[in-house]
Amino acid sequence: MNFKYLLLIVVSSLLFSCEEDYPEDYAGKPYLVFPAGENAGSIYVQKLYNNFYYYQDESITRDTVYIPLATMAAIADEDLIVSLEAFDSDTLTYPERIDSETINAVPGVHYLPFDDSEIYDNLIFNKGKMQDTIPLIILRDPSLKEATYRLTFRLVDSENSIAADKAENRVVVYISDKVSRPSNWDTWEFGVYGDVKMDFMIRHSELVWDEDDVERVLDDSFLLAYYIFKFKEDLKKENEVLGDNGPLKEADGTVVSFDRIYY
Protein backbone atom coordinates (compact mmCIF):
# COMPACT_ATOMS: atom_id res chain seq x y z
CA MET A 1 0.00 0.00 0.00
CA ASN A 2 1.23 3.45 -0.83
CA PHE A 3 2.78 5.06 2.29
CA LYS A 4 0.84 8.29 1.69
CA TYR A 5 -2.51 6.47 1.82
CA LEU A 6 -1.44 4.41 4.83
CA LEU A 7 -0.61 7.60 6.72
CA LEU A 8 -3.99 9.09 5.77
CA ILE A 9 -5.79 6.02 7.15
CA VAL A 10 -3.87 6.16 10.44
CA VAL A 11 -4.53 9.90 10.95
CA SER A 12 -8.22 9.50 10.07
CA SER A 13 -8.48 6.64 12.54
CA LEU A 14 -6.90 8.74 15.33
CA LEU A 15 -9.18 11.67 14.62
CA PHE A 16 -12.25 9.43 14.67
CA SER A 17 -11.10 7.86 17.94
CA CYS A 18 -10.50 11.26 19.59
CA GLU A 19 -13.89 12.55 18.46
CA GLU A 20 -15.57 9.46 19.83
CA ASP A 21 -13.87 9.74 23.26
CA TYR A 22 -14.46 13.48 23.68
CA PRO A 23 -16.82 14.06 26.62
CA GLU A 24 -20.26 15.38 25.87
CA ASP A 25 -21.39 18.76 27.17
CA TYR A 26 -23.09 18.58 30.58
CA ALA A 27 -26.82 18.93 30.01
CA GLY A 28 -28.18 18.73 33.57
CA LYS A 29 -29.01 21.39 36.16
CA PRO A 30 -26.08 23.60 37.27
CA TYR A 31 -24.47 22.81 40.62
CA LEU A 32 -24.03 25.58 43.20
CA VAL A 33 -21.31 25.64 45.83
CA PHE A 34 -19.99 28.02 48.50
CA PRO A 35 -16.35 28.73 47.57
CA ALA A 36 -13.93 28.58 50.49
CA GLY A 37 -13.19 31.89 52.21
CA GLU A 38 -9.62 33.09 52.80
CA ASN A 39 -9.71 31.93 56.42
CA ALA A 40 -12.01 28.98 55.85
CA GLY A 41 -9.72 26.35 57.35
CA SER A 42 -10.89 23.78 54.80
CA ILE A 43 -12.24 23.69 51.26
CA TYR A 44 -15.75 23.23 52.61
CA VAL A 45 -16.32 25.56 55.54
CA GLN A 46 -16.55 29.29 55.03
CA LYS A 47 -16.57 31.54 58.11
CA LEU A 48 -17.78 35.13 58.16
CA TYR A 49 -17.98 37.62 61.01
CA ASN A 50 -20.40 40.46 61.70
CA ASN A 51 -19.97 42.57 64.82
CA PHE A 52 -22.37 45.46 65.49
CA TYR A 53 -20.10 46.62 68.34
CA TYR A 54 -18.10 48.73 65.89
CA TYR A 55 -21.19 50.57 64.63
CA GLN A 56 -21.25 53.82 66.58
CA ASP A 57 -24.85 54.58 65.64
CA GLU A 58 -27.15 52.54 67.90
CA SER A 59 -30.03 53.23 65.51
CA ILE A 60 -28.45 50.77 63.05
CA THR A 61 -30.47 47.64 63.72
CA ARG A 62 -29.53 45.42 60.79
CA ASP A 63 -26.77 44.72 58.32
CA THR A 64 -26.44 42.79 55.07
CA VAL A 65 -23.77 40.13 54.67
CA TYR A 66 -23.09 39.09 51.07
CA ILE A 67 -22.39 35.38 50.64
CA PRO A 68 -20.30 34.32 47.61
CA LEU A 69 -21.56 31.50 45.42
CA ALA A 70 -20.08 29.67 42.45
CA THR A 71 -21.54 27.44 39.76
CA MET A 72 -20.11 24.09 38.70
CA ALA A 73 -20.61 21.75 35.73
CA ALA A 74 -22.53 24.32 33.69
CA ILE A 75 -23.09 28.04 33.39
CA ALA A 76 -26.75 28.81 33.89
CA ASP A 77 -28.73 30.14 30.94
CA GLU A 78 -31.48 31.25 33.33
CA ASP A 79 -31.53 32.80 36.79
CA LEU A 80 -31.08 30.09 39.41
CA ILE A 81 -33.22 29.92 42.52
CA VAL A 82 -31.00 29.50 45.59
CA SER A 83 -32.40 27.47 48.47
CA LEU A 84 -30.77 27.66 51.90
CA GLU A 85 -31.26 25.61 55.05
CA ALA A 86 -30.19 26.77 58.50
CA PHE A 87 -29.33 24.00 60.94
CA ASP A 88 -28.17 23.33 64.48
CA SER A 89 -24.39 23.15 64.15
CA ASP A 90 -24.08 21.35 67.49
CA THR A 91 -24.87 18.23 65.43
CA LEU A 92 -21.90 18.56 63.07
CA THR A 93 -19.67 15.56 62.43
CA TYR A 94 -16.61 17.75 63.09
CA PRO A 95 -17.76 20.16 65.85
CA GLU A 96 -14.21 21.47 66.32
CA ARG A 97 -14.70 23.47 63.13
CA ILE A 98 -17.23 25.64 64.95
CA ASP A 99 -16.55 27.97 67.90
CA SER A 100 -18.09 25.97 70.75
CA GLU A 101 -18.39 29.07 72.94
CA THR A 102 -21.02 30.53 70.63
CA ILE A 103 -24.77 29.87 70.50
CA ASN A 104 -27.00 28.87 67.59
CA ALA A 105 -28.70 31.94 66.09
CA VAL A 106 -32.49 32.25 66.25
CA PRO A 107 -34.44 33.05 63.04
CA GLY A 108 -36.40 36.27 63.27
CA VAL A 109 -34.25 37.37 66.21
CA HIS A 110 -30.68 37.32 64.90
CA TYR A 111 -31.35 37.06 61.16
CA LEU A 112 -34.21 37.20 58.68
CA PRO A 113 -35.42 33.65 57.93
CA PHE A 114 -34.65 32.41 54.43
CA ASP A 115 -38.35 32.14 53.60
CA ASP A 116 -38.98 35.79 54.48
CA SER A 117 -40.08 37.57 51.30
CA GLU A 118 -37.42 40.26 51.72
CA ILE A 119 -34.73 37.58 51.50
CA TYR A 120 -36.45 34.92 49.41
CA ASP A 121 -36.95 37.21 46.42
CA ASN A 122 -33.22 38.01 46.38
CA LEU A 123 -31.88 34.47 46.67
CA ILE A 124 -31.00 34.39 42.98
CA PHE A 125 -27.83 33.31 41.18
CA ASN A 126 -27.85 35.39 38.00
CA LYS A 127 -27.68 33.64 34.65
CA GLY A 128 -24.48 33.69 32.63
CA LYS A 129 -22.24 34.02 35.69
CA MET A 130 -19.68 31.66 37.21
CA GLN A 131 -19.64 33.55 40.51
CA ASP A 132 -22.27 35.65 42.24
CA THR A 133 -23.41 36.71 45.72
CA ILE A 134 -26.61 36.37 47.72
CA PRO A 135 -27.69 38.64 50.62
CA LEU A 136 -28.14 37.62 54.24
CA ILE A 137 -29.78 40.14 56.60
CA ILE A 138 -28.44 40.13 60.17
CA LEU A 139 -30.52 41.67 62.97
CA ARG A 140 -29.13 43.64 65.93
CA ASP A 141 -30.87 42.01 68.87
CA PRO A 142 -29.99 43.06 72.48
CA SER A 143 -28.91 39.46 73.21
CA LEU A 144 -25.87 40.04 70.97
CA LYS A 145 -24.40 42.26 73.69
CA GLU A 146 -24.20 39.29 76.03
CA ALA A 147 -23.06 36.45 73.74
CA THR A 148 -21.86 35.67 70.24
CA TYR A 149 -24.30 33.72 68.08
CA ARG A 150 -23.61 31.58 65.05
CA LEU A 151 -25.78 31.03 62.00
CA THR A 152 -24.81 27.85 60.17
CA PHE A 153 -26.49 27.07 56.88
CA ARG A 154 -26.05 25.01 53.73
CA LEU A 155 -27.36 24.86 50.19
CA VAL A 156 -30.19 22.52 49.25
CA ASP A 157 -31.50 21.58 45.82
CA SER A 158 -33.92 24.03 44.22
CA GLU A 159 -36.21 23.63 41.25
CA ASN A 160 -33.43 24.54 38.81
CA SER A 161 -30.14 24.01 40.68
CA ILE A 162 -28.35 21.25 42.60
CA ALA A 163 -26.43 21.76 45.85
CA ALA A 164 -22.86 20.49 45.55
CA ASP A 165 -21.16 18.68 48.47
CA LYS A 166 -24.32 18.73 50.57
CA ALA A 167 -22.76 17.06 53.61
CA GLU A 168 -19.89 19.47 54.18
CA ASN A 169 -20.27 22.63 52.10
CA ARG A 170 -21.64 25.33 54.39
CA VAL A 171 -21.24 28.84 55.75
CA VAL A 172 -20.92 29.91 59.39
CA VAL A 173 -21.70 33.53 60.22
CA TYR A 174 -20.73 34.69 63.71
CA ILE A 175 -22.84 37.59 64.97
CA SER A 176 -22.22 39.76 68.02
CA ASP A 177 -22.59 43.27 69.42
CA LYS A 178 -19.71 43.19 71.87
CA VAL A 179 -15.97 42.93 71.89
CA SER A 180 -14.81 39.41 71.18
CA ARG A 181 -11.55 37.55 70.82
CA PRO A 182 -10.31 37.41 67.20
CA SER A 183 -9.69 33.85 66.05
CA ASN A 184 -6.05 34.70 65.27
CA TRP A 185 -5.28 36.41 68.59
CA ASP A 186 -1.61 35.81 69.45
CA THR A 187 -1.07 35.29 73.20
CA TRP A 188 2.70 35.42 72.72
CA GLU A 189 2.57 38.97 71.38
CA PHE A 190 -0.54 40.51 72.97
CA GLY A 191 -0.72 38.56 76.23
CA VAL A 192 -3.80 36.96 77.76
CA TYR A 193 -7.01 38.01 76.01
CA GLY A 194 -9.71 39.96 77.85
CA ASP A 195 -12.76 41.96 76.76
CA VAL A 196 -11.60 45.01 78.74
CA LYS A 197 -8.16 44.75 77.14
CA MET A 198 -9.72 44.55 73.68
CA ASP A 199 -11.89 47.60 74.40
CA PHE A 200 -8.76 49.45 75.57
CA MET A 201 -6.92 48.54 72.33
CA ILE A 202 -9.83 49.83 70.25
CA ARG A 203 -10.05 53.08 72.23
CA HIS A 204 -6.32 53.73 71.95
CA SER A 205 -5.83 53.06 68.25
CA GLU A 206 -7.50 53.63 64.91
CA LEU A 207 -8.06 49.89 64.46
CA VAL A 208 -11.02 47.68 65.40
CA TRP A 209 -8.74 44.66 66.01
CA ASP A 210 -10.77 42.15 64.06
CA GLU A 211 -9.12 39.20 62.30
CA ASP A 212 -7.88 41.40 59.43
CA ASP A 213 -6.33 44.03 61.72
CA VAL A 214 -4.62 41.41 63.90
CA GLU A 215 -3.16 39.69 60.85
CA ARG A 216 -1.91 42.97 59.38
CA VAL A 217 -0.17 43.97 62.63
CA LEU A 218 1.35 40.53 63.25
CA ASP A 219 2.78 40.53 59.72
CA ASP A 220 4.57 43.84 60.31
CA SER A 221 7.15 43.65 63.12
CA PHE A 222 7.61 47.44 63.24
CA LEU A 223 3.87 48.05 63.47
CA LEU A 224 3.56 45.38 66.15
CA ALA A 225 6.37 46.94 68.20
CA TYR A 226 4.75 50.37 67.84
CA TYR A 227 1.37 49.24 69.16
CA ILE A 228 2.77 47.21 72.05
CA PHE A 229 4.85 50.21 73.15
CA LYS A 230 1.91 52.62 72.68
CA PHE A 231 -0.47 50.40 74.66
CA LYS A 232 1.98 50.07 77.53
CA GLU A 233 2.46 53.84 77.73
CA ASP A 234 -1.25 54.62 77.35
CA LEU A 235 -2.13 52.02 79.98
CA LYS A 236 0.20 53.69 82.48
CA LYS A 237 -1.56 57.01 81.90
CA GLU A 238 -5.04 55.48 82.16
CA ASN A 239 -4.13 53.71 85.41
CA GLU A 240 -2.87 57.03 86.82
CA VAL A 241 -6.22 58.63 85.98
CA LEU A 242 -8.08 55.72 87.61
CA GLY A 243 -6.11 56.28 90.81
CA ASP A 244 -7.60 54.30 93.69
CA ASN A 245 -10.09 52.70 91.28
CA GLY A 246 -7.26 51.23 89.24
CA PRO A 247 -5.48 49.52 87.78
CA LEU A 248 -7.60 48.60 84.77
CA LYS A 249 -9.03 45.10 85.31
CA GLU A 250 -11.15 42.48 83.62
CA ALA A 251 -14.50 41.49 85.11
CA ASP A 252 -12.82 38.58 86.94
CA GLY A 253 -10.21 40.88 88.53
CA THR A 254 -7.34 40.09 86.13
CA VAL A 255 -5.16 43.18 85.74
CA VAL A 256 -4.87 44.34 82.13
CA SER A 257 -1.28 44.27 80.90
CA PHE A 258 0.70 43.99 77.69
CA ASP A 259 3.61 41.98 78.96
CA ARG A 260 4.71 39.34 76.48
CA ILE A 261 3.85 35.83 77.65
CA TYR A 262 6.84 33.47 77.84
CA TYR A 263 6.61 29.68 78.03
Image: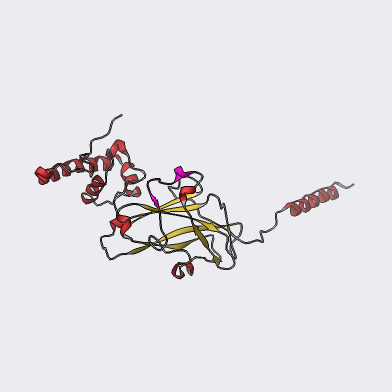
Colour scheme in the image? secondary structure
Q: Is residue 172 magenta?
A: no
Query: Residue shown at 49%/43% (left/top)?
Result: 94
Position of 188 with respect to 107 (left or right) is left
3 or 227: nearer the viewer: 227
Position of 77 with respect to 48 (left or right) is right
Q: How many marks?
A: 0
Please say if 123 is above or below 189: below
Position of 196 with respect to 216 (left or right) is left
Q: Position of residue 218 (x, y in %)?
A: 32, 42
- Tell me the chief SS of the magenta region: loop
Please say if 133 is above or below 255: below
Which residue, as the protein is rendered here, is positioned at the far top?
A: 263
Q: Position of residue 236 (x, y in %)?
A: 14, 41
Region of the chain picked out in magenta, as a range: 94-103
Please say if 58 is above or below 20: below
222 or 7: nearer the viewer: 222
Q: Is residue 98 magenta?
A: yes
Query: Residue shown at 23%/50% (left/top)?
Result: 205
57 or 218: nearer the viewer: 57
Position of 139 with respect to 165 (left or right) is left
141 or 199: nearer the viewer: 141
Q: Position of residue 57 (x, y in %)?
A: 26, 63
Quarter holding the C terminus?
A: top left
Q: Position of residue 2 (x, y in %)?
A: 88, 47
